[in-house]
Amino acid sequence: QVQFVESGGGLVQPGGSLKLSCAASGSPLEHYAVGWFRSDSEVAREAISCISAADGATYYADSVKGRFTISRDKNTVILQMNNLKPEDTGLYYCAGRGLWCGSSWSAGRSFGSWGQGTQVTVSS
């Protein structure tokens, strides 16, 4: 059974950058579309970005477009976060589904094998 693991979180000042990584164990990552999600004290789960396995298509929440970039290689999905803002603070999770993100990716439907999350704190 696949299990996703996140890494790369930390404390950064506003305007700074972080790179989050998502790896998979138990099954090849290349078999899954991978989404990144964020939770904080106010929002249980917010969809941030997704990358399909079938064609590499990428999707972003409006709040992060132009600042975050998702990419993948055979073993890792990377979320490059630039120009970070305090409202980007939260626990970031990755999870997988099928080969495609699909039109419902932002609802988080059909994603499974959630990791434990990695904390991102944007503060001066």
Image (cartoon, rainbow, N blue to C red):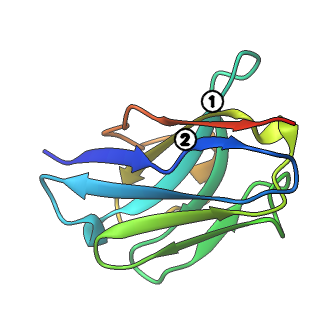
- Spot occupied by residue 103 in the image (x, y as percentages of width and height): 62, 59
Q: CA distance from mark 1 to mark 2?
A: 8 Å
Residue at figure coordinates x 42%, y 43% from the top left: 110
Residue 20 tag number: none
Name the kind of residue labelled 1 in the image.
Arg
**Quarter of the image holding residue 92?**
top right
**Quarter of the image holding residue 34?**
bottom left
Name the kind of residue labelled 2 in the image.
Gly
Question: In the picture, which quadrant includes the N terminus?
Answer: top left
Residue 45 tag number: 1
**Quarter of the image holding residue 38?**
top right
How many other residues sit within 10 Å of disc 1, few (<14), some (14-19) or many (≥20)? some
Question: In the picture, which quadrant includes the C terminus?
Answer: top right
Left or right, residue 104 beside residue 22: right
Residue at figure coordinates x 87%, y 47% from the top left: 14
Residue 108 tag number: 2
Does dot 1 land on a helix, a strand or a loop? loop
Is residue 116 in sight in this rendering? yes
Say if mark 1 contacts mark 2, CB within 8 Å.
yes
Q: Closer to the N terminus: mark 1 or mark 2? A: 1
State whether residue 17 is above or below residue 108: below
